[in-house]
Image (spheres, helix red, strand yellow):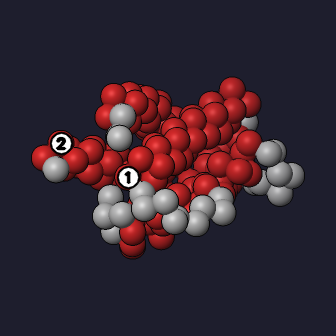
Amino acid sequence: MLDKTFITRKIKLIQEELSRLEALSKYSFAEIAEDFIKLYSVERVLEKIIMRAIDINQHIIAETGKGDEKVKGYEDTFYILSGMGVYTESFAKEIAPSAGLRNRLVHEYNDTKDEIIYESVKDAITQYTGYCRYVLQFIESKKES
């Protein structure tokens, strides 16, 4: 059974982090790259947003899936939600690669460039704002079922 309280709490946390990310997006790349506190803030906020969404994805899959979903990695959770009608396949194709960014941040891959992180901010704001809207609509539809 879907834990709507869990999901709405995670969505609220994502939305709070999106506000922080929005504030950080006002800085130029140079301003962020020159200030390790700003850079680390961007990295950590992105990581938290993406991981909370993955938590939501895993919960929705576990509680409303058929049980035969093949989840090989975090990226797959975004595609599976599109198959479950949470959002469109085209939206899944946009947002799913963010799981790879999360992996790069968490595992501190040496080839992760500050430019990649900086450039992902605007996409993350747009994508995760949409993600929150889609998930809230999905759980609202489950109340009527």
Q: Which quadrant would residue 91 be assigned to in this image?
A: bottom left
Q: Position of residue 125 (x, y in %)?
A: 43, 47
Residue depicted at 47% across the width and 44% down the height = 59
Answer with mark 1 or mark 2, whichever residue precedes in sequence: 1
Q: Is residue 69 above or below residue 62?
A: below
Residue depicted at 71% across the width and 51% down the height = 103
Residue depicted at 32% across the width and 34% down the height = 4
Q: Which residue is mark 2?
A: 143
Does residue 115 show up?
yes
Q: Is residue 20 above or below residue 116?
A: above
Name the residue furthest front: 67
Q: Position of residue 44 (x, y in %)?
A: 63, 34
Q: CA distance from mark 1 to mark 2?
A: 13 Å
Q: How many marks?
A: 2
Marks 1/2 in contact by CB < 8 Å: the verdict is no
Label 2: few (<14), some or many (≥20) within 10 Å? few
Q: Position of residue 89 (x, y in %)?
A: 39, 72
Q: Which residue is mark 1?
A: 64
Location of the N terminus (image quadrant): top left
Q: Is residue 49 above or below residue 12?
A: below
Residue type at mark 1 is Thr
